[in-house]
Image (spheres, rainbow, N blue to C red):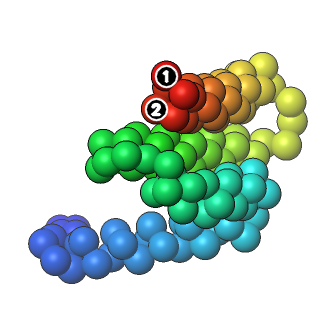
Amino acid sequence: MAKPGKTGVARVIDAAGYSWLGLQAAYRHESAFRQELLLLLILTPLALWLGDDGVEYALLIGALLLVLMVELVNSAIEAVVDRISDEHHELAGRAKDIGSAAVSMALVNAALVWFFVLVM
């Protein structure tokens, strides 16, 4: 019989450790992640200065965090596709292109949120 997995606090601690490893890997291996993280670090103080209340802070910073989250998923997709094969395959290319499109949409979303919160 297979040994059951960890539960409760032990599982949460393990999950946090794996998440930290994922962030480290993204920072180490993904230039786009580093660029978007720099954008977050520069714009977060600006959001806190320009925003008027907690809702605006959450919208401005949340939109930037969403870009990082989508970039992490895109990087994971690319890593899995690259692991499977070096050969060009239509579905592999499509998966990478769709992941890239998701990052682009997150960036557009961030720009629109900043525009609507700060200009409109």
Residue at left 15%, top 71%?
7
Q: How far apart are marks 2 and 1 (CA)?
A: 6 Å
Q: Vertical placement of 35 versus 25: above or below? A: above
Question: Where does residue 41 sit, x and y in percent of width and height?
Answer: 61, 63
Quarter where residue 77 is shown: top right
Amino acid type, mark 1: Met
Question: Where does residue 91 sit, x and y in percent of width and height?
Answer: 70, 22
Query: Farthest left residue?
Result: 8
Residue at left 13%, top 72%?
8
Looking at the image, residue 67 sits to the left or right of residue 30; the answer is left
Residue at left 21%, top 79%?
10
- Give me the disc on residue 117: 2
For residue 69, say whether it is visible.
no
- Give me the disc on residue 120: 1
Q: Vertical placement of 4 versus 40: above or below? A: below
Residue at left 23%, top 72%?
11
- Give me the disc on residue 85: none
